[in-house]
Amino acid sequence: MKLSNRVRRAAADLLFLFVLPGLVALLPWPLGFAVLRRCARIDLLYRSGVAPAWSVARRYLPDADETAWKRRHRLLRLVEPVDSYLTLLRSRTWWRRRIVRDGEWPAPGTPALLLTFHWGAGHWVWSQLRMHGIDAHFLARRPAPGDLGVGRLSVLYGRFRGWALRRIGSAGPLYLGGSVPQIEAAFAAGRSIVGMLDLPPRADRSRFRASVLDRAVQLPCGLAELAVRSGVPVVIFSCGLDPDSGTRTLRIETLPREADVGQIMTRYAAHLDRCLREQPAYWQMWSAADAMFESAPPQA
């Protein structure tokens, strides 16, 4: 890569992962969020990620307005790094005033499978789990360069983000690939697992057929099977963002203790469907949607 390109990428990471989010986090939130909303109107921002996501999403969302969709998608990308700083700088009282919660967490100290989505901005949820007395790992793939930014400085930000997650309440990641014994050990030790199933299922793993946006979709269901086998309760939650005020919404759905895999996955798909109908631009998996939906819309 040319030196000029490396410099540009490093500058972009410095600005959008460190300087801008750090400054916005120090501002009064109404003013800081207004700055982010203004930035979200700039078409050049995050173009390499927004354009491919929209090219897929527009085929599943024929009534979506392109300009509004892209602004919401950019707004979410701008808010996420700011949350890394807000969770460290703001008090519990500050967050409590800005989160609208619907539903209740499981009892403190009770191991559970907490299922969520690649939707919305949920970095702050770890402080809420700690406040409630829930010690949880999160299940993730191993990070790769470029996951959080465009240059090498994104690796440094990734380390900071991981440190911040532990600081605010996360028990740390469990990486995909041979993680089943670790998950079972966590359950046995009274810890919970946070996982996401809105992913393309692997060919060699179990999957469940459900309906999302009135289309058949295939979702991996191995975690649900593991929870049923381990006898732990299952909770589904989503972390939303009001695009006008910056208020956060936390929706928690507790499933019956006797729920089987089919019931868990059906409720999970229904919760995802509701999120995508309310704020489709907040889903971060649009680029992989064709690998999940059985019948993808034709290319425009």
Image (cartoon, rainbow, N blue to C red):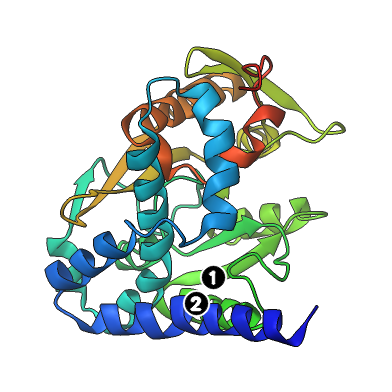
Q: Which quarter of the figure is the C terminus placed in?
A: top right
Does label 1 or label 2 sit earlier along the sequence?
Answer: 2
Instruction: Please provide percent x and percent y for residue 106.
Output: 36, 47
Tell me the number on the disc at residue 166.
2
**Amino acid type of the residue that numbered disc 1 sits on in the rendered structure:** Ala
Residue at disc 2, secondary structure: helix
Residue 255, compared with residue 34, is above or below; it is above
> Circle 1 sits on which residue?
171
Q: Nearer the viewer, mark 1 or mark 2?
A: 2
Classed neighbour count for the residue bearing mark 2: other residues with Cα under 10 Å, few (<14), some (14–19), many (≥20): some
Instruction: Please provide percent x and percent y for residue 80.
Output: 41, 64
User: Rounded to the nearest whole Å, what is the CA distance between mark 1 and mark 2?
Assistant: 6 Å
Residue 278, compared with residue 51, is above or below; it is above
Residue at disc 1, secondary structure: strand
Q: Nearer the viewer, residue 198 or 54?
A: 54
Which image quarter: residue 140?
A: bottom right
Q: Are marks 1 and 2 in contact (CB under 8 Å)?
A: yes
